[in-house]
Image (cartoon, helix red, strand yellow):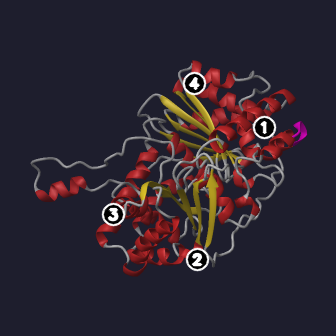
Amino acid sequence: MRIQGLPGVVLSFGIVVAGLPPATRAEASEPRPVTVPVVHSRLANGLQVVVSEDRTAPIVTVEVMYRIGFRLEPKGRTGFAHLFEHMMFQGSANVGKFEHVASVQANGGVVNGSTRFDYTNYFQIVPSNALELTLWLEADRMRSLDVTPENLKNQQDVVSEEVRVNVLNQPHGGLEWLQLPREANTNWYNAHNFYGDLSDLHAATIEDVRHFFETYYAPNNAVLVVVGDADPDEVLRLAEKHFGGIPSRAVPPLPDVSEPRRTDEKKVSQRDELARTPAMAIGYHLPRRMTRPFYALSVLDPLLVGDESALLYQKLVKETGIASSLYGGINLLGTNFDVLGPMLYTIRVDYLNGRRGEEVLAAVDDVVQRIQTEGVTGEELRRAKVAFRSAFYDILEGSSLPGFGRANLLAAFTLFDGDPGRINTILDDIDGVTAADVQAAAREYLRPTNRTSIDRVPAPNTGASR
């Protein structure tokens, strides 16, 4: 399981003590299950509130997750979900422009937000004595965001520059997370430009933006999560105090984001004027989230791309020397579970000049076909489950952003499943995966006829475009 942007310590939940008898050492090294405390409530206006008490340190993580992301933005409004992430820091009725950030930082905290496939989130990590201030700040902008022409124009320019810097002016910019979904999917909601076409962004009017806010930034379209040094009853009291008076709104039904079963392989060739070496993005359509095949591929994932010992790294980098690096996973922008709609199992390969994209695909097929025909060994299955468990615990206890990984999972399970308690059952689902499950999932979902690849090579010096 990929941990995006959350470096941390891999926790060991068992120790081996020298000098103990062999049986005792074995028992001591067994991983002990971790139970995350969860209190889940809903206010009268529909806002769901989740509290996970943890008195380890005098800090709290406060996150608000809204059910609107790249995938769900309306047609003709590409990039609105991301644009609005920026707009939410432009002030509200009682908070001036950028004062939200300044207030959190003045209390020694950190604050940020992000836009993902199926949600937009905002979070703060603060000393626990700043809990009420943080809740008040979040409630004020949910109730009364300051949507002005000046703020809109400013943020249109900011987002446009971000697109130019991060995508348009980068070698292979957005290849695996932005371009690949557009080529692999057929449903507009999964296949449009998630960052936003610049023409759409600049065509947005103040009425468009206000309507977007009124439509999606509603308490009944959101989850509030508090993780850390806080009493659940006190959090619920403060949530009612600050959020309870915000009226619910008529949230439109979710669009149909389903994709048909893929039956033919798609290969795309592109040229990149900024690149000096070639790269390939490969995507296989995944099964529905929280199904047995999904869990099986979650187990297979670390065996394929987990680290330098993984099968694909060994094949493409160590054995054949085709590639210089590769990485991949079920969700390159988060975890396996903070997405809801159709996803791709994605592999990004940077390969060497003088080699061909067909060699990359052939090497990938060689590894995958071994699993499809022979399956995985008992030792490989055990190792994969250990890797998954370690990554999952790392998310829960991320050191650079304490509490954020836990808060984000709780928010996603609440928003998508209506049950934040699923955070305590996922490892049971993973442990139940068998070698036969992995082999069957590989046969059905990692077949070439379920695959899209983009082979992007350096453009010649003639000025040819992508």
Q: What residue type is labelled 2?
A: Thr
What segment carries the magenta color? 204-208
Mark 1 burial class by Cα count in 10 Å: few <14, some 14-19, many 20+? many
Mark 1 or mark 4, which has the lower sequence index? Answer: 4
Q: Which mark is residue 449?
A: 2
Mark 2 or mark 3, which has the lower sequence index? Answer: 3
Q: In this view, does 88 lie to the left or right of 311?
A: right
Q: Residue at x 78, y 37 (%)?
A: 246
On the image, numbered disc 1 is attached to which residue?
246
The CA distance from mark 2 to mark 3 is: 26 Å
Q: Does the magenta stretch include residue 159?
A: no
Mark 1 or mark 2, which has the lower sequence index? Answer: 1
The CA distance from mark 1 to mark 2 is: 49 Å
Which of the pair 273/248 is nearer the observer?
A: 273
Q: Residue at x 42, y 61 (%)?
A: 322
Where disc 2 sits, the SS reads helix
Residue 22, located in which quarter of the rendered image?
A: bottom left
Where disc 4 sits, the SS reads helix
- Name above or below for residue 29 compared with residue 168: below
- Asked if marks 2 and 3 touch (Cβ < 8 Å), the reply is no
Q: Which mark is residue 130?
A: 4
Q: In this view, does 172 lie to the left or right of 208?
A: left
Q: Which of marks 3 and 1 is in front?
A: 3
Q: Which amino acid does label 4 sit on?
A: Ala
Q: Nearer the viewer, mark 2 or mark 3?
A: 3
Mark 3 or mark 4, which has the lower sequence index? Answer: 4
Which of the pair 397/32 is nearer the observer?
A: 397
- Asked if marks 3 and 1 touch (Cβ < 8 Å), the reply is no
Q: Which of marks 1 and 2 is in front?
A: 2
- For this orientation, the residue located farthest to the front is 462
Q: Where is residue 15 in the image (x, y as percent from the top left)?
A: 23, 48
